[in-house]
């Protein structure tokens, strides 16, 4: 919640929400697309003993439709799951505590009073520093 004091033009913030960078969400989604493409590329040579151009002509209409429909449904479900995990995991920093909230089916909340925190150590990997 934010309050604005008109007299001094100061903004007072009651708490801050911190979430993992959207870059890492995008990396997970790109990895999901790459895995789906990899499964599709592996599926056709295994499903047929023919060479690749002949596989696309003959098998895509016979039993490839069921595979792609299953792959599509699985990919959409996993994409929604990954996005929901990202949306529902964050930290709230209050003047007296740090709260870690996560989960969208089974919600978990960890409260850490600032009076119990003596020091903090921040570590970032290569991508964290650059993005």
Image (cartoon, helix red, strand yellow):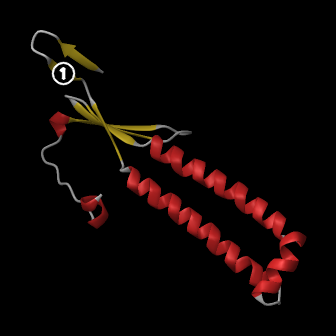
Q: Is residue 108 left or right of residue 84?
A: left
Q: Is residue 9 left or right of residue 49?
A: left
Q: Is residue 32 left or right of residue 43?
A: left
Q: Nearer the viewer, residue 98 or 55?
A: 55
Q: Residue at x 12, y 44 (%)?
A: 118
Q: Residue at x 24, y 32 (%)?
A: 97
Query: Taking 71 as reference, is 17 above or below it?
Result: above
x, y percent for residue 38? 62, 74
Q: Residue at x 83, y 65 (%)?
A: 65
Residue at the spot of label 1: 11
Q: Work out which quarter of the rendered image holds the C terminus and state it.
A: bottom left
Q: Residue at x 18, y 21 (%)?
A: 11
x, y percent for residue 94? 24, 30
x, y percent for residue 112? 26, 37
To which quarter of the image does residue 51 belong? bottom right
Q: Work out which quarter of the rendered image holds the N terminus and state it.
A: top left
Mark 1, secondary structure of its residue: strand
x, y percent for residue 54? 82, 85
Q: Nearer the viewer, residue 67 or 9?
A: 9
Q: Number of callouts in the render? A: 1
Instruction: Say few, some or many: other residues with alpha carbon within 10 Å of mark 1 (under 14 / 14 to 19 / 20 or more).
Output: few
Query: Taking 92 as reference, is 86 above or below it?
Result: below
């Amino acid at each position: 919640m934010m309050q604005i004091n008109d007299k001094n033009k100061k903004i007072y913030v009651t708490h801050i929400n911190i979430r993992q960078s959207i870059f890492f969400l995008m990396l997970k989604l790109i990895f999901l697309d790459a895995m789906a493409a990899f499964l599709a590329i592996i599926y056709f040579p295994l499903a047929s003993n023919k060479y690749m151009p002949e596989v696309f002509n003959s098998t895509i209409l016979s039993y490839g439709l069921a595979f792609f429909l299953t792959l599509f449904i699985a990919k959409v479900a996993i994409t929604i799951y990954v996005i929901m995990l990202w949306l529902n995991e964050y930290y709230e920093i209050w003047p007296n505590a740090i709260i870690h909230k996560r989960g969208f089916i089974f919600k978990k909340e960890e409260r850490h009073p600032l009076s119990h925190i003596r020091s903090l150590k921040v570590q970032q990997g290569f991508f964290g520093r650059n993005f």
